[in-house]
């Protein structure tokens, strides 16, 4: 018999059952040495009680449990609808059992009635999301045991699922940054004389590069019009922009106490707002905060990382260096920290990226007013609340 099997067998006895067993053995031991009949009665009663609970473990529960969360990604304050379907897949009638489903720090318990073969019992409930974060749901388990809770056999039927709660966000105007031309870039409305996306033909003007003359179309135009006319190719700029957001996870960078917690959540709201705007602008988006990081074209992954981000001890400079490694083609950088962080750290974090990268530092300071300043090529936005961000970004782009 393996140790895993032994642990499973001993695991059916719950803490209360071990307490009753210990009390019974201790009472019998003291009674044997002191000769107290009362303790003998107590010891025997405890052991008989424990033995009497064992028949409740007999039998098997064979069910299929389907857990559905709709939606699995929500904004803070929204409600998630959860549905749990328990189907008896055994060939015989299922005895009543207790169904448990952990949801965050709470545990939902339901009494499942007796079910004939193939019958289904459904439970529905709602999950209210108050704050950004991750809410674990499951695993769903059935419990077969005695009414006193001395022994039980628990079986998990589902995996752990998660509800990802995104922070509150604000709408932003187009970021309009990032001018890296790329073969797989996104076409813009900017006319170019030399790029990758062909747009149209136009008449030649002095100074045009003769390499862009379309000779076949020029010959046709001259044959049709009877006069000399050259046509040149006109292009649209193709730009691939990559926005990288680095958030300082150190508690000391923000205000003390509850105010600092609120400022960190403001930083998360600002981050999520920028990521959504970047995705709408067809940017790639990268996010780094402490040990959590995401990079690529899938905005959902970046927002999922925002949901998981928590305060820690990594700091802004190491996070910026990691971001420079995973997003080496960054064209637009946002550094978010609190007003208590040394500004030297912000400058050192910005220095982790090449000088051609447009860099914006956002300092979260709930005790100050919104301002925009420029320091050594670094745009510094001082944000008191997430609602300040749209106006500050618009002003800084002027």
Image (cartoon, rainbow, N blue to C red):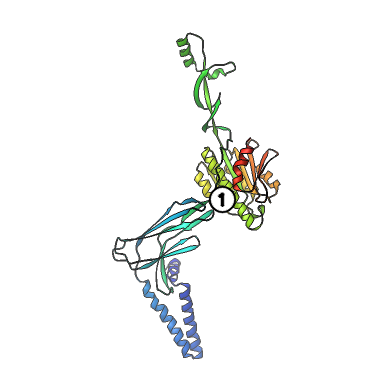
From the top left corner, tell me how far across and down residue 377 is, in percent.
68, 38
Disc 1 crowd rating (10 Å Cα; few below 14, some 14-19, many 20+) is some
- Vertical side of 224 occupied by 26: above or below: below
Image location of residue 78, percent across then percent down: 49, 53
User: Looking at the image, which is closer to me, 62 or 229?
Assistant: 229
Going 32% across and 67% down the picture, which residue do you hit? 114
Please indicate whether residue 275 sits to the left or right of residue 341 in the image.
left
Q: Is residue 312 visible?
A: no
Measuring from the top left, give residue 335's x and y in whole percent.
63, 45
Q: Quadrant of the C terminus?
A: top right
- Reply above or below: 72 against 31: above
Q: Where residue 268 appears, x then y in whole percent?
A: 58, 49
Residue that numbered label 1 is attached to = 292
> Where 120 falls versus 7 (above or below)?
above
In-image side of 192 versus 52 (left or right): right
Residue 38, relative to residue 190: is it above or below?
below
Q: Quadrant of the N terminus?
A: bottom left
SS of the residue under disc 1: strand
């Amino acid at each position: 018999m393996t140790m895993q099997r032994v642990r499973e067998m001993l695991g059916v006895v719950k803490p209360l059952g071990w307490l009753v067993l210990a009390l019974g053995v201790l009472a019998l031991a003291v009674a044997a040495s002191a000769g107290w009949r009362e303790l003998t009665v107590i010891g025997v009663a405890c052991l008989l009680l424990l033995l009497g609970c064992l028949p409740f473990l007999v039998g098997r529960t064979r069910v299929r449990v389907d857990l559905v969360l709709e939606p699995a990604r929500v904004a803070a304050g929204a409600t998630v609808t959860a549905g749990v379907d328990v189907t008896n897949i055994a060939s015989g009638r299922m005895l009543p059992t207790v169904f448990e489903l952990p949801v965050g720090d709470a545990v939902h318990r339901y009494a499942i009635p007796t079910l004939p073969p193939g019958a289904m019992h459904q439970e529905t409930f709602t999950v209210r999301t108050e704050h950004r974060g991750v809410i674990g749901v499951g695993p769903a388990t059935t419990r077969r045991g005695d009414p006193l809770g001395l022994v039980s056999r628990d079986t998990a039927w589902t995996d752990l699922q998660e509800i990802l709660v995104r922070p509150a966000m604000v709408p932003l105007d187009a970021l309009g940054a990032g001018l890296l031309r790329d073969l797989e870039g996104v076409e813009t409305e900017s006319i170019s004389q030399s790029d990758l996306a062909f747009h149209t033909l136009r008449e030649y003007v002095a100074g045009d590069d003769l390499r862009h003359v379309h000779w076949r179309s020029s010959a046709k135009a001259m044959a049709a019009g009877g006069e000399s006319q050259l046509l040149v190719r006109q292009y649209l700029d193709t730009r691939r922009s990559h926005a990288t957001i680095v958030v300082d996870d150190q508690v000391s960078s923000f205000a003390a106490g509850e105010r600092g917690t609120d400022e960190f959540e403001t930083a998360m709201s600002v981050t999520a707002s920028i990521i959504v705007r970047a995705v709408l602008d067809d940017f790639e988006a990268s996010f780094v905060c402490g040990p959590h990081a995401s990079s690529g074209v899938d905005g959902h992954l970046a927002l999922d990382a925002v949901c998981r981000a928590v305060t820690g001890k990594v700091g802004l400079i190491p996070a910026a260096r990691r971001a420079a490694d995973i997003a080496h083609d960054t064209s637009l950088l946002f550094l978010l920290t609190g007003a208590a962080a040394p500004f030297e750290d912000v400058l050192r974090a910005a220095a982790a990226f090449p000088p051609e990268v447009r860099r914006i530092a956002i300092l979260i300071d709930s005790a100050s007013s919104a301002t925009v300043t420029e320091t050594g090529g670094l745009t510094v936005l001082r944000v008191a609340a997430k609602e300040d961000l749209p106006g500050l970004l618009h002003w800084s782009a002027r």
